[in-house]
Image (cartoon, rainbow, N blue to C red):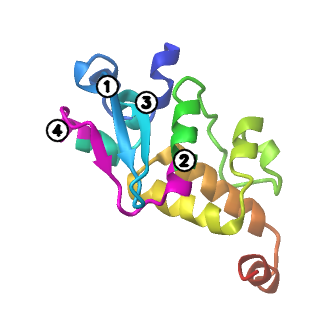
Amino acid sequence: MSSDNLLYDSFDSLETISNNDMFDGLINLISNEGDSFEISKRTACMSRVIRVMIELDNKETEIPLKEVNSNVMKKIVEFMKYHEHVEMPEIQKPIQHTNMKYLTTEWDVEFINVDNDLLFQLLSVANYLDIKPLLNLCSAKIATMIKGKTRQQIQEIFHN
């Protein structure tokens, strides 16, 4: 598999994206604050929701994402751009460690090392936009935070 196709491993129709000019060019993702984040259409297709939007109207140059604030959008675009050419390893389940460094790459560990509020926003938006690799990364981070903890300890983690 060529590095141009790494990010589309989980899609049913890899050829549809890599061999279709519909996905050439750039698109601007617009946050709920009106900030614009430029990204290639191919990279943006890591999100199945955005992919469908592009397929429905490939002449569109902007996609408003009213459910996504600029802080979260910046992180999501950073994630998608990085993983455009660097394959994210599959995170083994069930989670066996409480330290993310045993589950994924150093880049992903640093990327997901965020406060709980941002972590849950990333999880929510990854789910909303159907970005499976990011959804898996966020879920793994949360699993490592609660693995081996009592109910009381988990409540303390998420209510602080």
Residues drawn in magenta = 54-73
Q: Is residue 34 magenta?
A: no
The amino acid pointed to by label 3 is Tyr
> Which of the marked residues, 4 or 1, is nearer the chain's N terminus?
1
Q: Which three-letter amino acid code belongs to the residue tagged 4?
A: Asp
Circle 1: residue type: Ile
SS label for mark 4 = loop
Which element carries disc 1, helix, strand or loop? helix
Q: Which residue is mark 2?
A: 74
- Number of marks: 4
Q: Residue at x 32, y 23 (%)?
A: 25
| Residue marked by disc 1 | 17
How many residues crowd around disc 1 within 10 Å: few (fewer than 14), some, or many (20 or more)?
many
Q: Is residue 3 left or right of residue 116?
A: left
- Quick check: 132 above or below 149? above
| x and y percentages locating residue 10 in the rendered image | 44, 36
